[in-house]
Image (cartoon, rainbow, N blue to C red):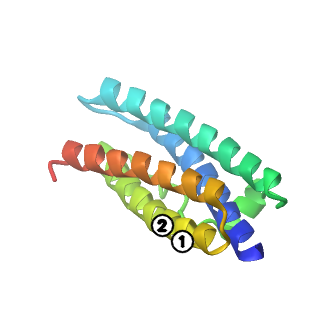
Amino acid sequence: MENLYSALNVQIANWSVLYTKLHRYHWFVKGPLFFTLHEKFEELYNESATVVDEVAERLLASGGTPVATMKEYLSIATIQESNGETNADEMVSSLVADYKQLKAELKELAELADQHDHDVINDLAVGLLVKLEGHIWMLNAYLGK
């Protein structure tokens, strides 16, 4: 079960880093689509906060211990902090890359949960995959892809 707990902790760390990155984007986005992206980034950082809470509570309910400090998040996250993007398209492109990374790791988490016969964690991972596929599609559409 330790590898399952570790995978859940990576999700907590990644969504926490994403939460901070999305706040930065929300505050610093500029340009003709400011209002649209400002609102979208807020929606996404609120979602990130909810995901962190859901995954941490699922980990606790399963007998694990969630990471809960910035130092821990940054030490295990596979999502990188913002590199100072100021261009709206760069922000959105960075999010697409992050969401694709999360998607790949959530697929692995779902498989790991199956190996441990943990249907609830599998369901959590699959539910997040559905959200991410929608985000990737919409953000790519914004980018004209």
Q: Of the residues tagged 1 and 2, which is closer to the observer? A: 1
Which residue is rendered at x = 74% and y = 67% of the image? 5
Q: Is residue 34 left or right of residue 65?
A: left
**Above or below: residue 95 compared with residue 109:** above
Circle 2 sits in a helix, a strand or a loop, which is it?
A: helix
120 sits left or right of 99 in the view: right
Q: Can residue 70 be seen in this view?
A: yes
Residue 102 x %, y %: 48, 61
**On the image, which quarter does residue 2 sit in?**
bottom right
Q: How many labels does the image show?
A: 2
Amino acid under label 1? Glu
Residue 35: % across, % down: 33, 23
**Residue neighbourhood size for the residue with mark 2, other residues' Cα within 10 Å, grouped as few (<14), some (14–19), many (≥20):** some
Q: Which of 73 and 4 is in front in this view?
A: 4
- Residue bearing mark 2: 107
**Discs 1, 2 touching: Cβ within 8 Å:** yes
Residue at 22%, 42% in the rendered image: 142
Who's the residue at 44% across and 59% down the image?
98
Is 142 situated above or below 65?
above
Helix, strand or loop under label 1: helix
Camera-side residue: 130 or 25? 130
Real-space Cα separation, disc 1 to disc 2, in angstroms: 6 Å
- The residue type indicated by label 2 comes to Lys
> What residue do we see at 70% from left, 60% from top?
73
Pinpoint residue 66: horizontal percent, then vertical percent: 79, 57
User: Circle 1 is placed at which residue position?
Assistant: 111
